[in-house]
Amino acid sequence: DAGITQSPRHKVTETGTPVTLRCHQTENHRYMYWYRQDPGHGLRLIHYSYGVKDTDKGEVSDGYSVSRSKTEDFLLTLESATSSQTSVYFCAISDHRSTDTQYFGPGTRLTVL
Amino acid sequence: TQLLEQSPQFLSIQEGENLTVYCNSSSVFSSLQWYRQEPGEGPVLLVTVVTGGEVKKLKRLTFQFGDARKDSSLHITAAQPGDTGLYLCAGDSGGSNYKLTFGKGTLLTVNP
């Protein structure tokens, strides 16, 4: 199994509070991704990184920001959480492109009350 | 935005039956991947197809990439309860950075 951890694994927070989710890898892979998974929507890309300090938006980036100051860590921040951001968040990593596997972390279940 | 439509959305069958899951798009993909996800876990890659018309087999699972690289199918022969899970297709559009577009998934339940 690829070395990917996510923290926290579960979090309950209130509307309007800031939340940061952490993804940590031990594989030295170049690409890192944040997805959210919701019933009826599948996996949707929030942001991704193609190197240290190099990030770009995915299809559902509004309300989210990311940072990657080290190869191994990719942080996802909800500046002011809303109930619509209640979801399961997955981090993934990949080394090359096209035919390469994306390895997924175990997920973080976030509930915004 | 490139879309991948998966069908059916839900499938419940008896052990030993055969089934096919479809993944369709109006866009061309440079490669397409199939993942399986079990409850409470992240998706795990099953196969990657790259060439139009390509067929890959993984034990009782057969994957096919359409000739035009816009669609794919997953066929399971003699399904078993261990095949239960969410099957996701994902396509790489081949842009400058590597990112995948996922379908919404097919939730398969195989009853003993």
Image (tube, coloured by chain):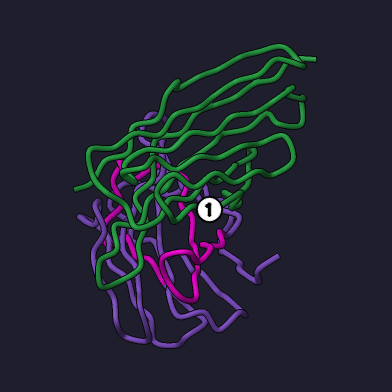
Chain colours: A purple, B green
Kindly identify the residue that appears in the image at 69 percent across and 25 percent down.
B77
**Percent coordinates x, y for residue B72 in the rendering:** 43, 38
**Percent coordinates x, y for residue B4 in the rendering:** 32, 38
Q: Is A105 drawn above or below residue B105 in the view shown?
A: below
**Percent coordinates x, y for residue A19 in the rendering:** 38, 61
Magenta stretch holds residue A91: yes
Q: Which of the pair B16/A113 is nearer the observer?
A: B16
What is the quadrant of the C terminus of chain A in the image? top left
For disc 1, the chain is A
Q: How many marks?
A: 1
Q: Residues within 10 Å of mark 1 (few under 14, many from 20)?
A: many
- Element under disc 1: strand
Location of residue A50 (image quadrant): bottom left
- Residue ID for mark 1: A108
Location of residue A68 (image quadrant): bottom left
Q: Which residues are magenta?
A: A75-104
Kindly identify the residue that appears in the image at 59 percent across and 52 percent down.
B45
